[in-house]
Amino acid sequence: MKHAKQIALKVAITYVILGAAWVLLSDHVSMLFAHNKITLYIFFQRYKGWFFILITGLVIYYLVYKRTSEILEANEKLRRKEQQLAINSQQYQSLFIHNPDAVFEVNQSGEIVAINPEGEKLLGLSIQELQAENISDFFPEKSILAVRDYYKKALNGKASNFETTMVDFEKNEKILRCSLVPIFIYEEITGVFGIARDITSIRENEQMIVASEKLSVIGQLAAGVAHEIRNPLTSLKGFVQLMQGTRTVDVNHLDIMLSEIERIDLISSEMLILGKQQDIPLRQVNLDDVMRQVLVLMNAQANLDNVSIIYENLAGKDLYVKSDANQLKQVFINIIKNSVEAINNKYHGNVTITITKKEPFACITVRDNGVGMEPEKVKKVGEPFYSTKETGTGLGLAICKKIVERHKGSMEFKSSIGEGTEVDIYLPLSDEKIL
């Protein structure tokens, strides 16, 4: 209002000054042109006011027209901006309210400022009830430290993606896939947007598939393992019958019997390990040890199929990776089993397994001289429910690929018809074990 008065005062003063200047100037001009002619002087005096009105009218018209045009144009721009702002606001509200994921806004104090219906459903509370809660109250102790760390990173301007567990209002634990994004207003961070999806059922289904595939692998290995155990059992039975007949004990025979019993125990132990749950934290493991334990099982099936398995550690030393040994065994067993089955009773069938070091990875290569695959099939290997075998489920390699990816590794397949297949498994190296 004060600014408007100042502008009005300036206009009034300017008008008065211009009017006074016109009076003085017109009197001087009329005197100059009249030359003591009273009639001409009276003419000038009579019509100079009309000239002033005409000129000032034109000037005022021009100024008002120009200013009005500017105001109307500014108002139109403002109207369009308000309209666009309203559209953006409705788009944001649609994205926020109708989002199938839980979306919530948290201020710098960790308080929930806004949450969409899916978020209320996830937490089991309404926005009114949540305003009295802190976001950290919904995370168990095992998860809260990591969540706080991601939250602090978001407040420092760094977005994050992660998985964590939470506990809703009814104390049900859920697995969430989350994203935290900083909120910038005038280049200042005022809070954090969180996006969360409940993946509990997805994880449960994955575990069921993994367990099912593991049982399938164990079932297929059972025949080979039974054959492998039957050999030492036959030896043990023969020595026992011999001792019954001679009523004497030969120390050499006892050593052989003990060795056969240890072999049976080793094979049984490996089968039991495969059947255990896989919710074990990652530990540093020796790849050579894991592979040799797998070969105890796989040699049995290879012998039944008349296939030779050749293993060699080309790294020159033990390589260590941070992993779950049982999951790695499942991967190696699936890959080797597929290689053995791909040989298709070939007379000189063999599977070659090598371990090499390719910084910063350890590379496990499984190569066979089987039937091979066309390039089109190689591209699809590892996709769920895609199998080159008539009775295959297409889940074995898909699970293997998933396990390797969880270990931050990768798998590559190379194959040619009639020349065999090569599988390269890359796993990130861990620090060498200190003895």
Image (cartoon, rainbow, N blue to C red):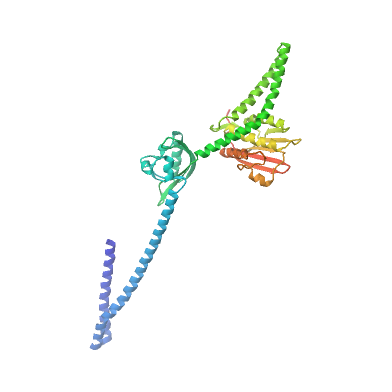
Q: Is residue 63 left or right of residue 273?
A: left
Return the x and y of residue 425 as percentages of the image width and height: 63, 39
* Vertical placement of residue 83 versus 291, above or below: below
Q: Is residue 62 left or right of residue 394?
A: left
The quadrant of the image that shows the N terminus is bottom left
Q: Nearer the viewer, residue 22 or 138?
A: 138
Residue for point 60% across, 33% down: 214
Q: Is residue 149 visible?
A: yes
Q: Is residue 36 visible?
A: no
* Vertical placement of residue 331 versus 52, above or below: above
Q: Nearer the viewer, residue 119 or 352?
A: 119
Q: Is residue 221 left or right of residue 186?
A: right
Return the x and y of residue 100 as percentages of the image width and height: 47, 46
Which residue is the extreme one toward the right? 347
Q: Quadrant of residue 265?
A: top right
The quadrant of the image that shows the C terminus is top right
Q: Quadrant of residue 233?
A: top right
Return the x and y of residue 307 as percentages of the image width and height: 72, 33
